[in-house]
Image (cartoon, helix red, strand yellow):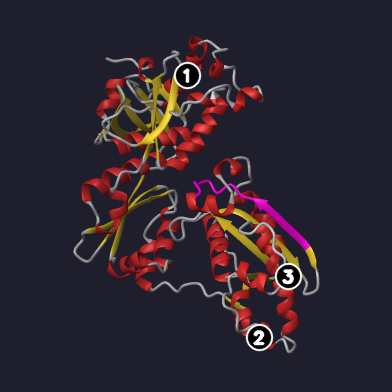
Amino acid sequence: MYAILDIETTGGKYNEEGITEIAIYRFDGHKVVDQFISLVNPERPIQAFVVGLTGINNEMLRNAPKFYEVAKRIIEITKDCVIVAHNAQFDYRILSLEFDRLGYDFDRKSLCTVALSQELLPGHASYSLGKLVRALGIPITDRHRANGDAMATVKLFKMLLAKDTEKKIVQASIKAIPKKVIDRKLKDLIESVPSECGVYYMHNVNGTIIYIGKSKNIKKRLTQHFTSDNRKSKKIQEEIVGVTFEKTGSELLALLKENEEIKRHKPQYNRALRRTKFKSQLSHFIDDKGYINLKIEKADSRKKSITTFSNSLSAKNNLERIVETYSLCQNKVSTLSKSGNCFNYTIKKCNGACIEEESPESYNDRVMQFINKHSLEEKSMVIVDRGREVDERSFVLVEDGIFKGIGYYNLNFQLNNIDILRSILVTMEDNRDARHIVQSYLRTKKVKKVIPIPEITTS
């Protein structure tokens, strides 16, 4: 029995990709006996070039099931099967990576139709799926979508089975993908860290910090470092002799701590993370009709912004959600001059600011609701989240739009005095990266609560 599959991913760094779409056909050697096709919410942004290639964007995946919600179905449909894919090493790695994140050991044998095609169908100029199936007269639809590519692989596999009359090559090609063997030193380092949220520090023989990272599960993340074959990971594996860590409980605090520590220590293998974490910002201006307009622009520290985004694609996708959530006018979220009504007015999702049917006062009130919620400008608040222990909470302090630092307090302590909070605060540098982390986290993740400082007394 075979499980013929294709996976589309977010793209990105090796072993940090997420699945965006999966299609699996259970094939008995003669016909398809079961199938599973689904979009998957990867819980991370999709790379812009991948959106262009597949047509799958972040908006399409907002309501798609997350991987843990489809994992059981994938286990069931691939049970007692050989995984078949065009470049099986990639698809199997991605699938195993997702199961590793869930703490499940996904173990199947595999068969690659690229290698099999090279053996049974020699002489082709290219063995990429698209070019090969076209050369063989096999129809393919929805190229670079999981269902279309998986079905093309089914048809290709049928042809390969027919060509392999003695079944020798098929049997020889079926193999278990070996898991990377971790040497004793690295195993011991993995065992020395917890499966908890926090920041970790990798040290060389001189005790110098060579890499700093954060993770919701330090042990799993360290395992990924030590099983990766990319050049940077191999260098780290050779140089590392020790790992230290700090538990944070909250992912927000881990992000802020990682940002602070990388800027302070400048580890040699964190070069990419030393750069600014965001490339786009959202600002506003008032047009000649008195309406507040929102616009995406390149990040510029000299200009005031409402909030920041990691890249232009993230900014565009978030702006689309803002327009929908606050019933804003599409013509008022661009610097382009447009005449007439916007498309949303046609489908009754815009109240007519584009044609002055809605007053500036009414329209601007909704824009300000958004700005007041997402801007840190002149805001003072305490963000409360998970602590390192069950009887503890963490907090982030922002005063007058300035990030002050982080801290922890016991659940028995009543959060009603700002001076006491300041006394237990671990101060941190206020910079645009730290503010970006706070804003983007509040925009995309849940925290225990956010308390405006005016609700907390001073002594």
Q: Does 46 appear above or below 301?
A: below
The residue singled out by tag 2 in the image is 169
* Residue type for callout 1: Gln
Q: Magenta stretch containing residue 40, yes or no?
A: yes
Return the x and y of residue 95 as percentages of the image width and height. 58, 61
| Element assignment for label 2 | helix
Q: Residue at x 26, y 46 (%)?
A: 261
Q: Position of residue 307 (x, y in %)?
A: 39, 31
Q: Nearer the viewer, residue 304 or 422?
A: 304
Q: Is residue 421 left or right of residue 373?
A: left
Q: Quadrant location of residue 256?
A: top left
Please state the horizontal and vertical placement of residue 393, each as a whole percent of the image: 40, 34
Foreground residue among 261 and 200: 261
Magenta range: 34-46
Query: How many numbered markers are drawn?
Result: 3
**Element under disc 3:** helix
Residue at image location 45% in from the left, 13% down from the top:
289
Which numbered disc covers residue 369?
1
Q: Of marks 2 and 3, which one's residue comes earlier in the chain? A: 3
218, above or below 33, in the image: above
Would residue 376 be found to the left or right of residue 348 on screen? left
Q: Residue furthest left?
A: 206
Residue reaching furthest front?
339
Identify the amino acid type marked 2.
Ile
Q: Please tell me how crowded label 1 is: few (under 14), some (14-19), or many (20+) other residues with Cα within 10 Å.
A: few
Return the residue at label 3: 155
Q: CA distance from mark 1 to mark 2?
A: 65 Å
- Mark 1 near mark 3, Cβ–Cβ under 8 Å? no
Q: Is residue 184 above or below residue 102?
A: below
